[in-house]
Image: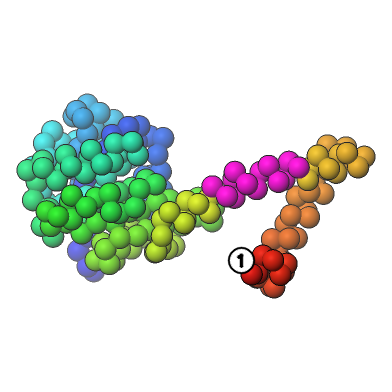
Amino acid sequence: MAKLQPVALVFAGPVSRGTLGQLPGLRERLRWIKSSSVATATRAVRGLRAGVAVPDYADLSPAVIILISVPDDNVNTWAEVLANCGLSWHKKIAVLYDSTWPSGALEPLRAVGAAIATLNYHPRPEQFVCEGDPIALRALRDLAAGKPLIPLTSKERYFSALRRTRDEFIPMFASCVADFRAAGMQKAAAEKAAAAALQESVRSYVRAGHRVLNPLSRSN
């Protein structure tokens, strides 16, 4: 059996409300956790039921993969801090976890020798999406541990699709319900009718793709 690559976690913010626990291969590989204080890291140890809290970045030296879980607003700052923390990044893999930023946000770490990538949890259907350096993406397979791992070519387009399914679809669904109710249906019946019609539209697109679109849409 191949030797498991040891993993370290650097985090800021509430780990308990994140999705790190969804990584099936993390618990048996996670060895060290570094945060703003040992007390904060210890809470993460309890929450994840893995690893030990460490006080210094030097304690992460044996790790091959270093997961970075920090608020999106501070990713650039953290990348600079980690690149200059005194840790040797040569032959290490730096993975930005559950962030909207692409792997390029970790460029300061690549400049000091790390391979870089991002990894995001996608709940429905349950899978992980990733992008970054090929060597880093190969290492992420063990962390996904059997759950689908989908390489992305554009994280921006991925999040654009997520926003559209929420910000554009929900108002459209509400408008359909409103029209059915205006036609005389009760609320529950209107919601069921709208849901059924939209589900059929999705099935039609899955079966026929762009052929179900009108000519104007195809030309775009």
Q: What residue is at 75 percent from the left and 50 percent from the top?
A: 195
Q: What residue is at 33 percent from the left and 36 percent from the top?
A: 73
Compared to residue 84, the image places residue 12 above or below, namely above
Compared to residue 47, the image places residue 133 above or below, namely below
Q: Quadrant of the N terminus?
A: bottom left
Magenta span contains residue 167: yes
Element marked by disc 1: loop
Instruction: Indicate left or right for 150 with 163 as reference.
Output: left
Q: Residue furthest right?
A: 184
Residue 10 visible, this angle: no
Colouring convention used in this rendered image of the protein? rainbow
On the image, the x and y values in percent for residue 202 come to 69, 61
Instruction: Indicate left or right for 37 with 170 as reference.
Output: left
Q: What residue is at 20 percent from the left and 37 percent from the top?
A: 34
On the image, the x and y values in percent for residue 6 come to 20, 54
On the image, the x and y values in percent for residue 15 come to 34, 36
Q: Which residue is mark 1?
A: 220
Secondary structure predominantly adopted by residues drawn in magenta: helix
- The span picked out in magenta is 163-175
Query: Foreground: 159 or 92?
Result: 159
Query: Foreground: 20 or 180?
Result: 180
Of the residues shown, which amino acid type is indicated by label 1? Asn
On the image, the x and y values in percent for residue 68 come to 27, 45
